[in-house]
Image (tube, rainbow, N blue to C red):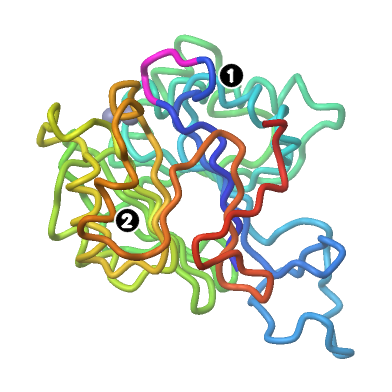
Amino acid sequence: MIRLTTVGTGTVSPHAERTSAAYLVETGWPMVDGRWHFGEPRQNPDASDAPSTIGHRPSVCLLMDVGAGTCHRLAQFGLPWTTITHLAITHFHADHFGELPALLFAMKYGASETRTAPLTLLGPIGFGALLDKLAAAFGDWVTAPGWPLTITELHPGTPVALAPGVTLDCTRVPHTDESLAFSITTGRTRLVYTGDTGPSEALGDWAKGCDLLLAECSLPDNLAMDIHLTPTSVAALAARAQAKRLVLSHLYPPVEQVDIRAGVAASYGGPMDVARDGDVFEVGGDREVGGGGRERVRGDR
Ligand SMILES: [Zn+2]
Ligand SMILES: [Zn+2]
C-alpha cells in the first residue's frame, strides 16, 4: 500500500497555512498496530506465516520535493524525517527544492541519533551539477554528509527501483525544461504526482488508471497559463487518466477564492480532495481510505 502525507500544499507565495511543496510517500504493508512489513504488500497481513522481516519502518520513505517550510512541517506532523530513505525533486524551482540543504543539515546535526542509513537523492538531469553548486555554497556535507549518499539523475522511461517491489518512474511535463512528473508503484498500487505542469494529454495518458493522482491546481481558470493547471484543466487531466482518486495541491491564493470542487466536478466524477498541509491518504491496502473519504491521522488542524 501507499501512504501519502501532503506535508506542504502551497507554492512560492508565503501562506499562513500552506507551506511550499513537499509530499511524503511511505510504502509497505502496515500491521494493524501501525507497524510495517518490508517488501511486497501481502493479501493477509495477519496471516500466521508473516515474514521474519517485519519492521517498524516502511520499506520506502520518500519525500517528493522539499520547498520552504518542509523541515518544520515534518516535525509538526510527527513524520519520520530522520529515516527518510529517498528524496526526489521534480524540478529546480525554489518552492520545490529550496529547503534541501536545510533538511540535509538537519539530518546531519539536528537528529538525536547519528545517521548511518543510506540516503538516495533523485532529480532531473542536471541535479548532480546543482548539488555541486549547493556544496560549494554551503559546504562539502551537502554531497558528503557522513552517511552513504547516492545521487541519481532521472531519465523518463527508465524506472528506478527504490526498494524490492517499489519503483519510481518519471515523464517530462510542460513547466520548465527539466520538469518531471513522478509515478510510484508498489504491487498493483500506483500513485502519480504531476509536480508543476501545464495541461498535457500525454501526461493524462501516462497516468492512465492510477490509484491516486496528486495534481497541482495552481490557478483559477481566469488566470490560466500554459505552465500550470486550473480546476478545468486538472479535471481534464484526471478524466483522461481515469484516475481512481484525485488529490489537489500547490494552490496559489487566487484559486482558493473560487469553487475548485465545482470546477473539477464538471468533467471529473471521481473522488476528489483539496489537500491541506498534514492530510493523509492511503491507497492499495485493506485500510484503504477511498470513495471520497479522508482519514486525518496526523497534524494538528
Ligand atoms: Zn511550484
Ligand atoms: Zn515550478
The quadrant of the picture occupied by the C terminus is top right
Q: Amino acid at mark 1?
A: Ala
User: Could you tell whether 203 is left or right of 210 in the image?
Assistant: left
Q: How far across and how far down the image is residue 118, in percent?
A: 66, 46
Give the residue furthest to the top. 137
Taking the spot 42% from the left edge, 61% from the top edge, the residue there is 271
Taking the spot 26% from the left edge, 57% from the top edge, the residue there is 156
Q: How far across and how far down the image is residue 296, in percent?
A: 67, 47
- For the question of whether residue 41 can be seen, the reply is yes
- For the question of whether residue 121 can be seen, the reply is no
Give SS at disc 2: strand
- Marks 2/1: CA distance? 25 Å
The picture quadrant where one finds residue 21 is top left
Q: Amino acid at mark 2?
A: Cys
Q: How far across and how far down the image is residue 20, in percent?
A: 45, 25
User: Could you tell whether 277 is left or right of 217 in the image?
Assistant: right
Taking the spot 52% from the left edge, 41% from the top edge, the residue there is 23
The image shows residue 20, relative to residue 242, as above or below, that is above
The picture quadrant where one finds residue 240 is bottom left
Which is nearer the eye, 141 or 165?
Answer: 165
In the drawing, what numbered circle is on residue 102? 1
Give the extent of the magenta segment: 11-15
Residue that label 2 marks: 170
Taking the spot 67% from the left edge, 66% from the top edge, the residue there is 28
Q: How far across and how far down the image is residue 103, in percent?
A: 61, 25
Q: Earlier in the sequence, mark 2 or mark 1?
A: 1
